[in-house]
Image (spheres, grey):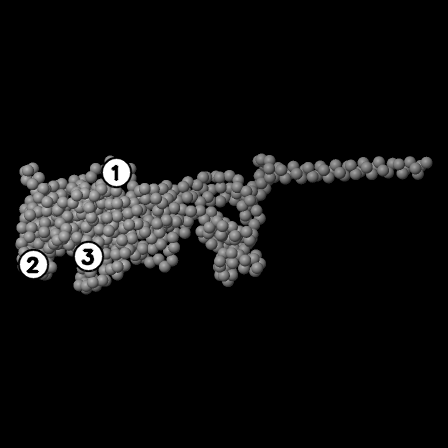
Amino acid sequence: MGAVKKQQIKPGIARWRFALVALLLCLLALSLVFHLARLQVLPQEERGYRFLQDQGNARTIRTEEIAAYRGSIVDRNGELLAVSTPVHSLWANPRLLREAGAGELRQLASALEMKPAALSGRLEKYRDKEFMYLRRHLAPEQAQKVLELDTSGVYSKKEYRRFYPAGEVAAQLLGFTNIDDRGQEGMELAYDQWLSGVPGTQQVVKDLKGRTVQDLAVKREARPGRDLRLSIDLRLQYLAYRELKHAVAENEASSGFMVILDTRSGDVLAIANQPSFNPNNRRGLTAAAMRNRALIDQFEPGSTVKPITALAALESGRYRPHTPVDTSPGYIRVPGKTLLDHRNYGVIDLTKVITKSSQVGITKIALDLEPNNVRGLFYRLGLGETVGTGFPGEAAGILPSRSRWQPIERANFAFGYGLTVNAVQLAQAYSVIANAGLKRPVSLVLSDNKADTEPQQVVEAPLAREVTTMLETVIGPRGTGKRADVEGYRVAGKTGTVHKVGSEGYVDNRYRSVFAGFIPADRPRLAAVVVIDDPRQAKYYGGEVAAPVFGSVMAGAMRLLQVPPTEVESAEQQLAVQLSERGSES
């Protein structure tokens, strides 16, 4: 009986012991879970627990930069000139990537379109670093192919890349950004602070391989840059660029540039340069191709300033458009030099001095005027000072000032030697004449506040209109600028042919061909300057090389801007009407 009783007790003791052990194990598991919760989940202020929680976050949570969008650049009509597009840049932690096998590295190099030796060389170079770029600015689908390899230590970050839809057509004006999307040239540089955004930050959770597995919170939103609206009309820009490129190639010139102003507002509507470059692919880029020559290059304007000297003569009160000037015998000796006309024009009036671009006639007039009065007029029209566009490197030009002028200096100054201008300055001066003496500020940026800026009356309106009529005769059949004519419109302008300067002074067989003018002459809308530098063909006169570019561009511009044609009267008729009006006023 005792043996049987002992066997009945043993199963009960075993069940009790099993339950006790199971309970203890459950309590141990619960305590571990509670301890982990205190460390990782529940907010604890105790030093030890808080320290461990912070250490865990420090190993998994990272703060990343959110790239900011750079503002777009558009033309006056809203057409895109520069825009930023999202791209991905691949980077690596060299210390982690060096642990990858040779096969993985070969696959990675192939996906990156690199030679394995090149990738190994970069890893060796950055062996002690924790960051190096693998490829910058890849399209998202290209970057994804690399990331799908799941190579340890390889990561991606979102950036932006600048794209220029107009390509080389407006390259020198817009400039470009570097790989970090910062302005380096042109308007990108001038308005870099305006266009640049402010990056944001966000917290993310990383896995053991450094990959983002969860976005936690945005600490600071990225603030995009502001858009910039230029005064340029992209339609006119294409037109000017096309005709300029053709002229430079046809004349085998070294370079050329053209600027078009809106005479009513002072806005720059086009500013084209040759040679140019593609800002979307800058391989082989040269410094010469980057220059915005219309604003940076200074040149002697030559005969294009003769009308300004004629205007000074009218201001003196001693000359009128029909005042006779004796140019016989076709040359004039000034101490130090003999100045020639193409032929002996004999006795001609002031208007014909401009029509024929008579060197002798304008020299006699200049020697009869007070030189500082002539210089003062040049300055009032905007020569000798920057036009204030804010473009980096804008040239102010050289407008000499002397207490005593030598005769040869007075003569040279009167027909455009001994001073320098840029193309925008010269266009502004012609715009003043076109606007009956009103001078408006020139701008590359479209502004809504121009109505608050009052134009300056720097020349008497009747005198400016008389010079306009003189300039119309230059485009007539007997003038030097007849190739600038635009059918159906009255055109006013002046040609210029300037000897280039070499190491030993002016060179006899190298020239700069210039044309400056405005259209329509009776109700001006556009003023423009064309410069073709160093044409190597037989023709080199401004009327042969630069004037046709003006005519072609303005003909297209009148159509694009829908300016209706006018009935063209002869310049002589217009001058007669103006003279009679002045007579009746007096």
- Callout 3: SS: helix
Residue 331 placement: quadrant: bottom left
Q: What residue type is labelled 2?
A: Asn
Circle 1 or circle 2, nearest the eye: 2
- Residue 131 % position (x, y): 49, 53
Q: Is residue 410 left or right of residue 197?
A: left
Where the N terminus falls, by quadrant? top right
Q: Which of marks 3 and 2 is nearer the N terminus?
A: 2
Q: Does 356 appear above or below 64?
A: below
Circle 3 or circle 1, nearest the eye: 3
Along the line of sight, which residue is nearer the eye, 362 or 3? 362
**Residue hosting label 1:** 450
10 Å neighbourhood of mark 3: few (<14), some, or many (≥20)?
many
Q: Residue furthest right?
A: 1
Q: Earlier in the sequence, mark 3 or mark 1?
A: 1
**Residue hosting label 3:** 544
- Residue 18 % position (x, y): 79, 38
**Residue hosting label 2:** 344
Q: Residue at x 87, y 36 (%)?
A: 9
